[in-house]
Image (cartoon, helix red, strand yellow):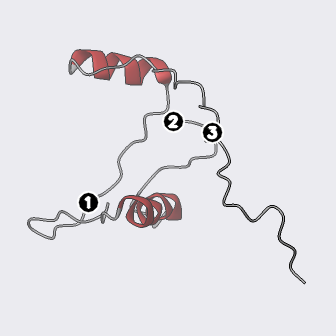
Amino acid sequence: MSPGLGSLGSSDGDLSGKIIAQSSQRVFRIDALNFAMCGSERRWIAAITSGEAITKILDHLELPSAVIQPSPPRAPPPQLKFGFEGCSEE
């Protein structure tokens, strides 16, 4: 566990797990602390932050673990001309 993360979702009412769950709900529109099918409450028991551990898990599950480099940004589209260049706002 990384320093500063605390124990996520511990029974002592630690707030960091709830903050992560609320962020997930806002960003991904999922309720990270409740199961959709039965409504049971989930508890955070761990947060895996080691890149090496994450790679091993993904490789074991036969999922892609290599970081894909994004393509460079493309140039902006050409500026369209609408024929208003000679007009003034007066």
Q: CA distance from mark 2 to mark 3?
A: 7 Å
Kind of residue sitting beneath label 1: Arg
Kind of residue sitting beneath label 3: Pro
Label at residue 42: 1
Label at residue 1: 2
Label at residue 76: none
Q: Residue at x 68, y 48 (%)?
A: 79
- Does residue 66 lie above or below 33 as drawn? above
Find residue 17 and report its horizontal and vertical position in percent. 45, 58
Label 3 belongs to which residue? 3
Q: Residue 90's quadrant in the figure?
A: bottom right
Kind of residue sitting beneath label 2: Met
- Does residue 15 lie above or below 47 as drawn? below
Q: Is residue 10 left or right of residue 60?
A: right
Q: Nearer the viewer, residue 7 or 38?
A: 38
Judged from the image, the secondary structure of the residue bearing numbered disc 2 is: loop
User: Could you classify mark 2 by the number of other residues whose Cα lies within 10 Å: few (under 14), some (14-19), or many (20 or more)?
Assistant: few
